[in-house]
Image (cartoon, rainbow, N blue to C red):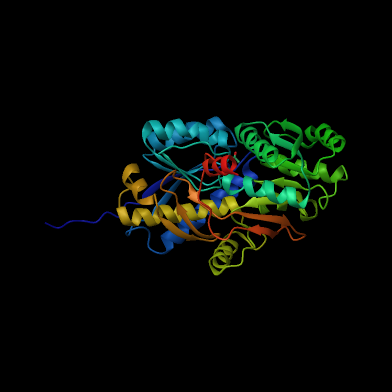
Amino acid sequence: METTKTTEPWRVGVLFSQSGFMAVIEETQLRGTLTAIEEINAAGGINGREVEPVIYDPGSESRAFGRLAKRLMVEDGVNTIFGCYTSSSRKAVLPVVERLNGLLWYPTLYEGFEYSPNVIYTGAAPNQNSVELCRVLMEMYGKRFFFVGSDYIYPRESNRIMRELVKNSGGEVVGERYVRLGADRREFNEILREMKNAQPDVIFSTVVGDATVHLYQAYNDFGFNPKVTPIASLTTTEAEIKAMGYDVGEGHITAAPYFQGIGNDRNSSFVDLYKRRYGEDEPTNMCLEASYFQVHVFAKALGETNSIDTEILRASVIGSEYEAPQGEISINPVCGHADLWTRIGRANQNGQFDLVFESKDRVKADPYLIGYSRNLAFG
Ligand code: ACM
């Protein structure tokens, strides 16, 4: 009997905001996802079948992410979803993929302290950014920290962790303030005045999206000097720096697994590919890079299993390795988070980051900070 090989595409869901106050970064994650999908399809697809993205725009509304994840799984028949930037959007998708047994690929740094068999986490956990950032900031600038964040789970939890790190290193938190998600420029004025009075050595920002631009511009207007008292962040990438202006961003600090300027051949070909597609002036960034490499990790696993069933695919993804633009990464079999590089950069006048720290190898994901706590206990 003659058998016919299916050429039906592999359908996958894609959920990133193309509108609203998070589009400044999520639009780049959509582009990273599509860059990888186009690359895979141009090379013949996966086992002869193309990848077909079903794309929705949740418009920076966390609840819309949950609603659209359900639509993807129930109406579009998709069980693999690439998406989410904010932790509140991930928390909205989580019950959907858990109830319907889907697989969310989440390409954004977050606060840690979460595990789900229905999520592959490819952004940094606190042991891969905050721990080293705290050490470097104390060495370079001093021990008095002022926290400013957007008011939702990622900033609140990241600040809880950073407060512990600062305290355990003999530092002090001299202020902690929040603005609403989507805050405008005016909402930062009072906070900046308070910062001036508190005289911190470092401002640790967990502000996200468009509000990042407003914070850094307000900081500039208030006459702070980034050489003396920089803003340090886990989320301010080349994309936000471009939006605020290179002069405004210069001198500020970000911890990230990836910066556009990393000098290796894999990254050069990735940056070239991206710029050919989206324009010479469009920088890459850590969230875009994770969005890109996670599609390749998915494709590699799917090539082996030839099944998009969540359990079968996940079993193949766990423990796999991939040469990403940031360097060799792996999906940690214990926690389903990626083992990633730790880097700390200072923004320069061209909107790029000059490295001030780089790990010697990828750092194992430890989303519950178990290794850090153990070191403290024995330190
Ligand atoms: C974030 O909300 N995980 C940046």
Give the vertical position of 370 relative to 296 (above or below). Answer: above
Q: Quadrant of the C terminus?
A: top right
Q: Foreground: 337 or 237?
A: 337
Left or right: residue 369 compared with residue 227: left
Q: Foreground: 300 or 321?
A: 321
Q: Residue at x 74, y 44 (%)?
A: 213
Q: Residue at x 43, y 57 (%)?
A: 321
Tell me which image quadrant ligand 1 sits in.
Answer: top right
x, y percentage for residue 360?
57, 61
Whether residue 209 is visible: yes
Q: Quadrant of the N terminus?
A: bottom left
x, y percentage for residue 29?
56, 49
Q: Foreground: 292 or 20?
A: 292
Q: Residue at x 38, y 30 (%)?
A: 99
Question: Which residue is situated farthest in the left direction here?
Answer: 1
Question: Which residue is situated farthest in the front direction here?
Answer: 378
Left or right: residue 74 compared with residue 158: left
Whether residue 109 is visible: no
Q: Residue at x 32, y 59 (%)?
A: 47
Q: Specify the quadrant of the image occupied by residue 217.
A: top right
Q: Foreground: 233 or 219?
A: 233
Left or right: residue 203 compared with residue 279: right
x, y percentage for residue 310?
35, 42
Query: Count of labels shown?
Result: 0
x, y percentage for residue 181?
67, 33
